[in-house]
Each structure stands twice: as structure tokens, then as C-alpha cells.
Amino acid sequence: AAREDLERQLALLAASWDLLDEVAAVAPEELRKGPRGGGRELEAITHHVLGGEQGYLSRLAWKIDKGKATDLNEEMRLTRQATMDALSAAERGQIPERGPRGGVIWPARYFVRRVAWHVLDHAWEIMDRSSR
């Protein structure tokens, strides 16, 4: 049952990434400004989501080598693979209960919900700000 739950969680996370990728692929580079005249452009949103995912990995006591990627797409692919690897390790009980500095490690289910929410929030932002 635990493996089936993890598979479902990984599928939900992958679906949120797919939506972000699809939305970003058709969005204009310059998005409509927000209600107060501001907001990040598409590339900045993408970098923000990526940075968030890389930061969240520390909540599973997982490290990622940020210097390996040659471009943004490769960095996203490597970060997403590291996320899947970390979640699989968590399912096998290979993640410590406390981080190296004593911080609490997030349960895998919470991690997935947090990452998926962040990804979807920005996918919806891009969708909303792409419409004229």
C-alpha cells in the first residue's frame, strides 16, 4: 500500500510539472502585468519555481549538484530527477528523521503537496497573465 501511495503521489507531482511545462511552452515571453502593475516575466517565474524545488529538497535532507546543468531545461530535468530519487529513498526509509542541523524532515506526502502546490500556483499565474 505504501508503494502504491508513493506511485500516486509521484504521478500527481509529474502531472503538475507537465502542466507547468505545457503552459510555459505556449505563454508569451512578456506576460500581462499584475493588478498592481508588477509581476515576474516567464523566465523569472521558471527560475523561481526551480529554485523553490531545489530548496525544498533540503527538507528531505537531499542534496543536488547545481553545477552540472548546461541550460535551464537540463537543470529542471536534473532537479526533477533528484526529487523523484529523494522521494523513492524516503519510501524505502533511507531519509533520516532529522536533518544534519537537527531540522525536521518533511514527510514525503507533505513534500509532494508543497512542491505540487508551488508548481501549480505558478502555472496558474502564467495562464492568468498570458490571457489578454
Image (spheres, helix red, strand yellow):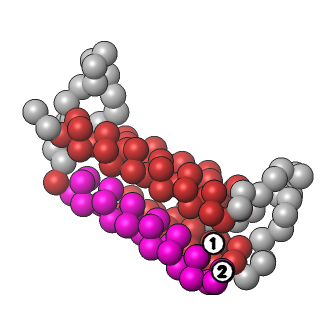
Q: Nearer the viewer, mark 1 or mark 2?
A: 2
Mark 2 nearby-residue class (10 Å; few <14, some 14–19, many ≥20): few
Q: Quadrant of residue 72?
A: bottom left
Q: Amino acid at mark 1?
A: Leu
Point 16% across, 54% down: residue: 26
Secondary structure beneath label 1: helix
Where 122 falls versus 35 (above or below)?
below
Point 71% across, 61% down: residue: 107
Q: Nearer the viewer, residue 24 or 66?
A: 24
| Residue matched to label 2 | 2
Point 62% across, 53% down: residue: 56
Q: Which numbered circle lies on residue 74?
A: none
Secondary structure beneath label 2: helix
Where's residue 16, x and y in %? 39, 61
Work out which residue is located at the far right of the displayed protein and give it. 102
Q: Nearer the viewer, residue 68 or 30?
A: 30
The segment highlighted magenta reads 1-25
Question: How would you classify the magenta stretch by its main secondary structure?
Answer: helix
| Residue matched to label 1 | 87
Tell me the distance, in whole angstroms, between the alpha carbons under discs 1 and 2. Answer: 12 Å
Q: Amino acid at mark 2?
A: Ala
